[in-house]
Amino acid sequence: MLDIDNVRTGYGAINVLWDLSLKVQPGSLTVVVGPNGAGKTTLLRAVMGLLPVTGGDIRLGGQSIARQPTWSLPEQGLAMIPEGRMIFKDMTVEENLAMGAFPGSRRPRLASNMERIYGLFPRLKERRRQMAGALSGGEAQMLAMGRGLMAEPRVLLIDEPSLGLSPVMTQEIFAIIKSLKQQGVTMLLVEQNTRMALSVADRVYLMRGGKVIFEQAADQVDLAKLHDLYFARDTREEPESSGQPA
């Protein structure tokens, strides 16, 4: 569904991703973990066209999107839930959700999709007339996720959904992500909470220094050994990847 092939990108003269490759299969939940500065958010920004791809290619459903403008990608089925939520605080919850139906082909189904979102997030329905700036951190994350789903994405990119949330709210958000996975939503999730990430993932990629250094099916990952790689500890026995690391 989403193929990232030997991608290079960065900020101006500073390159961040170095020939990075990964695949997201249809209906799967692919997780990217790694320490701060690994390039995880940079990867999602490159996929969304927010950063120039200076090498390699990004394909959605077999079609290259690497050098297309950001505003054209939601119509093609790509949506991103950014780190820090980035909701419109001076708009109501319902107005925020409506903004997610930006692609013209989705607007005729705005009402039905909004009811679907309210079914997933009953708390948003209770607060639909409230200003988004009055929401708690967890509610704001729900709103950001609901807004992304309003675009009917073929692939949903989610950046650090647990950031700044309490453990209880983190559990609730990941329960929603698991529910979306069961409904067949294809997702690429960036997350630092490796234990929670592995609990919902189909496949896991570990990034460090702008490169993928390890990949494996989530149900085969040894968490202790993954953490050794995550923190760059010396270890005699490293996890074995199924397939070639990107």
Image (tube, rainbow, N blue to C red):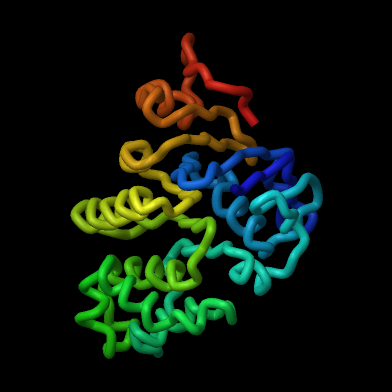
- In this view, the residue in front, 242 or 61, is 61
The answer to whether 33 is drawn above or below residue 46 in the figure is: above
Which residue lies at the image location 31% right of the left edge and 77% below the top edge? Answer: 115
The answer to whether 242 is drawn above or below residue 81 in the figure is: above
Image quarter of the C terminus: top right
Residue 207 at x, y = what percent?
Answer: 56, 37
The answer to whether 235 is drawn above or below residue 217 in the figure is: above
Residue 191 at x, y = what percent?
Answer: 43, 47
- In this view, the residue in front, 173 or 234, is 173
Which residue lies at the image location 59% right of the left edge and 22% below the top edge? Answer: 243
Which image quadrant for residue 162?
Answer: bottom left
* Residue that lies at the very extreme toward the top in this rendered image: 236
Judge from the rendering whether residue 194 lies leftward or rightward of residue 9; answer left or right.
Answer: left
Which image quadrant for residue 79?
Answer: bottom right
Which residue lies at the image location 75% right of the left edge and 65% below the top edge? Answer: 68
Which residue lies at the image location 30% right of the left edge and 53% below the top edge? Answer: 179
Q: How many tags in the picture? A: 0
- In this view, the residue in front, 193 or 107, is 107
Residue 178 at x, y = what percent?
Answer: 32, 49
Residue 133 at x, y = what percent?
Answer: 33, 82
Judge from the rendering whether residue 82 lies leftward or rightward of residue 55; answer left or right.
Answer: left
